[in-house]
Image (cartoon, grey):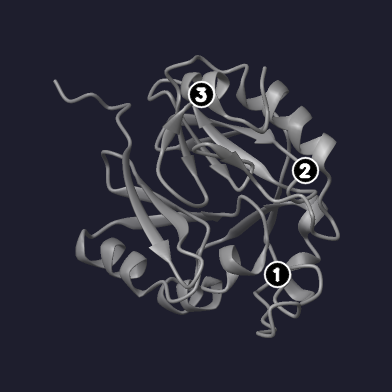
Amino acid sequence: MEDTKTIQIHAFPLGTFQTNCYVLEAPDKTCWIIDAGTDPESLIACIQENDLEPEKLLLTHAHHDHIEGISQVREAFPEIPIYIHEAEKDFLTDTSLNLSAMLGMPSIAPEADHFLEHGQILQLSGIPFEVRHTPGHSPGGVGFYQADNKFIISGDTLFAGSVGRYDFPTSDGPTLAKSIIEQLYTLSDDTVVYPGHGPATTIGQEKQTNPFVRP
């Protein structure tokens, strides 16, 4: 019998910053897009070539490198709704907040259709994902945790051997550390972390060796 809880994860490192954007594919071909970085053609092609049905575009946060491809995704899939934490609703249309002005490449994205809340449960074809608010790198950063498959999409909060930057105007180091300790390090050690940049890791690995935040 097919395991109806299995999620297939397609990862796409996009743009100059090699931002990891993800397509989460359910067994029934329904999918979610998580983040939409620069030049998302490969992500869009994956969905179209595999006959997937994109249901949601979820944002871990709204810094420039995670949102610049939203307009192209919307062109390909006009009905797809955009989800973001309310603390970053203005980032999508403010080039200072989303840091694109600072980088000399000002860009904006469509406004969000829905706001995410900490503890909210989203269902991908009946498979539950928990929204975990992880502010620090940005005020509305979130992770998407799937308990059965033991993974979390962490955005720019936690990386393999590192953490998200906290020297931006809306960032805060102590808040970031608190988020990692309370929202990520409380997951089981074998939980796989799919970050916004770089390779995947595990909670156990980061608890043991991450030099920036220790449990």
Tell which of 74 and 66 is nearer to you: 66
Is 29 displayed left or right of 134 in the figure?
Answer: left
Which amino acid type corresponds to the residue marked 1 in the rendered image?
A: Glu
Mark 3 → mark 2, Cα distance in angstroms: 18 Å
- Which-is-in-front pick, marks 2 and 1? 2
Q: Are marks 3 and 2 in contact (CB under 8 Å)?
A: no
Tell which of 126 and 35 is nearer to you: 35
Which mark, by number, is residue 136? 2
Which mark, by number, is residue 111? 1
Q: Are marks 3 and 1 in contact (CB under 8 Å)?
A: no
- Residue marked by disc 3: 203
Query: Residue at 43% of width from left, 76% of height from top?
Result: 39
For label 2, the crowd category at 10 Å Cα-Cα, with few meaning under 14, some 14 to 19 and many 20 or more, is many
Secondary element at tag 2: loop
Q: Where does residue 106 sit, x and y in percent of width and height?
A: 70, 84
Which amino acid type corresponds to the residue marked 2 in the rendered image?
A: Gly
Which amino acid type corresponds to the residue marked 3 in the rendered image?
A: Ile
Q: Mark 3 vs mark 1: which is more N-terminal? A: 1
Is 103 displayed left or right of 47 in the figure?
Answer: right
Q: In the current view of this chain or complex, which residue is farthest to the left?
A: 1
Secondary element at tag 1: loop
Secondary element at tag 3: helix
- Vertical placement of residue 59 versus 107, above or below: above
Is 74 displayed left or right of 23 in the figure?
Answer: right
Query: Residue at 76% of width from left, 49% of height from top?
Result: 166
